[in-house]
Amino acid sequence: MSLSPIAPQERTSTGISGLDDILGGGWPTGHLYLVEGEPGAGKTTLGLQFLLDGAARGDRCLYITLSETREELITVADSHGWDLAGIDIFELIDTNGLKPDAEQSILHPSELELGETIRDVMVEIERLQPRRVVFDSLSEMRLLAQDALRYRRQILALKQFLRRFDCTTLLLDDKTSGSNDLQLHSLAHGVLTLMQTTGEYGDERRTLRVAKLRGARFRGGTHDFNLGTGGLRVFPRLVAAEHRHDQRHEVMPTGTAKLDLLLGGGLYYGTNTLFVGPSGVGKTTTALSCVFAALERGEKATYYLFDEGLPTLVSRCTALGIPLQPYLDSGQLEIHPLDPAEVSPGQFAMNVRDAVERRGARVIGIDSLNAYLQSMPGSRFLLLQMHELLTYLNQRGVATILILSQHGVLGEGRIDVDLSYLSDALLMFRYFEARGSLLRALSVVKSRASSHEFTIREFRLGAQGIEVGPALSDFEGVLGGITTYRGSGSLLGDDTRIVEA
């Protein structure tokens, strides 16, 4: 005997697109859900967004409050530019009701045993017939219940009563009881946990996690979100496997013939290239010269700048023969200066997705990974999230350029995190000393997409942009920073011009 397929559940939107995506379309309709988090985590704002979305869809919405007054809720809404005119607000209990000698028989299983306050709530719900309800908050209910058994019975009674009206209900809990109470987790149809952590510097990081959602698939793990004017903005965790596209590794010329020769043809779409070297060696300029070549071919590009100011970058590139301003003015190029102390990894990944899927950017630059690392709680998280992001970009056929600075100027520089195994190609920059001057060299350490040169070439930055010289066959120890000269070959700065290699 074959089982009949289960019909898809009707969903009620949370009013937050990112959260709907995590929940697989929204809350399954007609059930009771627990939203928990410490004070200030964003529970009230989330509850108001849920009701405002319902009011916009024509649903009757009710906000039952034990902890905040109507005036306080209106103040919160005003700070976000919201109008609560379409939402019914019921103040369940006043300050007198919280005194020790007040009636404590709130929310008993039988309606006949309910106290005067909860009977008023029942009357209000029966009168309004709401489709969405937010109950804020459960900490006051714990105080009124006085013991765990009565508290559990109250929640169960509330769940059964609301079920009669087929309304979707959010219970907000600020976790001020001081204990890890899992009784609500067992009674609720789903559990959403809001968390916030504060580092030594910068804004707090806010994350959420769906701990439970009965009978429905959801996106697990931890997801970043922001709480600001306009409410919660949720950034679902990027899963590269959900964005698979078959892409051919087409060559992307860099605009410098000898650099293309060194790379075995150039950069490649659907791959990522890591530029590694000490500060000031020319990684950013080289990367932007590659971006500029793509812009001249009519392609769109997005560059994320963590380290340098935009005006300084544009003026420096212009002096080196890389005029970016016309492309910035036309919108073909977008450069986003970012503060690593203010942007979360989830928000950054969402910005990159928006650039690729909305703008159609074919070239993405991230400068630098060192600053991006500072927004992460640890290097292992950077590796995991960067792996998903790079896999996503490769599957979308994007040419990605990553900048990673090494500590120190000469010698074997230390790096904050090793991303070489995640990179499809690795272009290494080095300083070396010759004839009393500090010179630059570059080499391709690996390339998964092409057969590249294994030579070490001199290069320099000038008014004509990037200039790449012949292989440094007369030098030894260039990569190690301890250079030994064993020949008479010409350098780029010599009066005798080099012969094309």
Image (cartoon, rainbow, N blue to C red):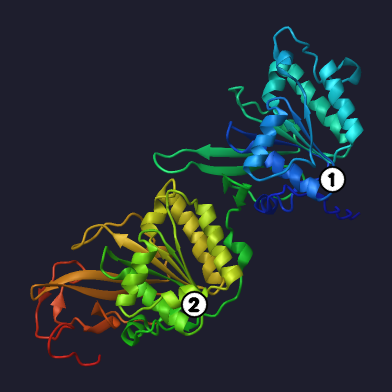
In the drawing, does residue 36 fall left or right of residue 277?
right
Which residue is rendered at x = 31% and y = 86% of the image?
258
Asked if residue 164 shows in the view, the reply is: no
Which residue is rendered at x = 49% and y = 38% of the image?
197
The residue positioned farthest toward the top in the image shown: 101
Q: Residues within 10 Å of mark 1 (few under 14, many from 20)?
A: some
Point out residue 482 in the picture as x, y percentages from the top left corner: 14, 67
Amino acid at pointer 1: Asp
In the drawing, does residue 324 fall left or right of residue 196?
left
- Count of marks overlaid on the render: 2
Mark 2 lies on residue: 269
CA distance for labels 1 and 2 = 48 Å
Along the line of sight, the residue nearer the viewer: 227 or 466: 227
Amino acid at pointer 2: Tyr
Q: Is residue 348 above or below residue 325?
A: above
Which residue is rendered at x = 34% and y = 84% of the image?
256
Of labels 1 and 2, earlier in sequence is 1
Mark 1 lies on residue: 59
Q: Quadrant of residue 193?
A: top right
Point out residue 424 in the picture as x, y percentages from the top left corner: 43, 71
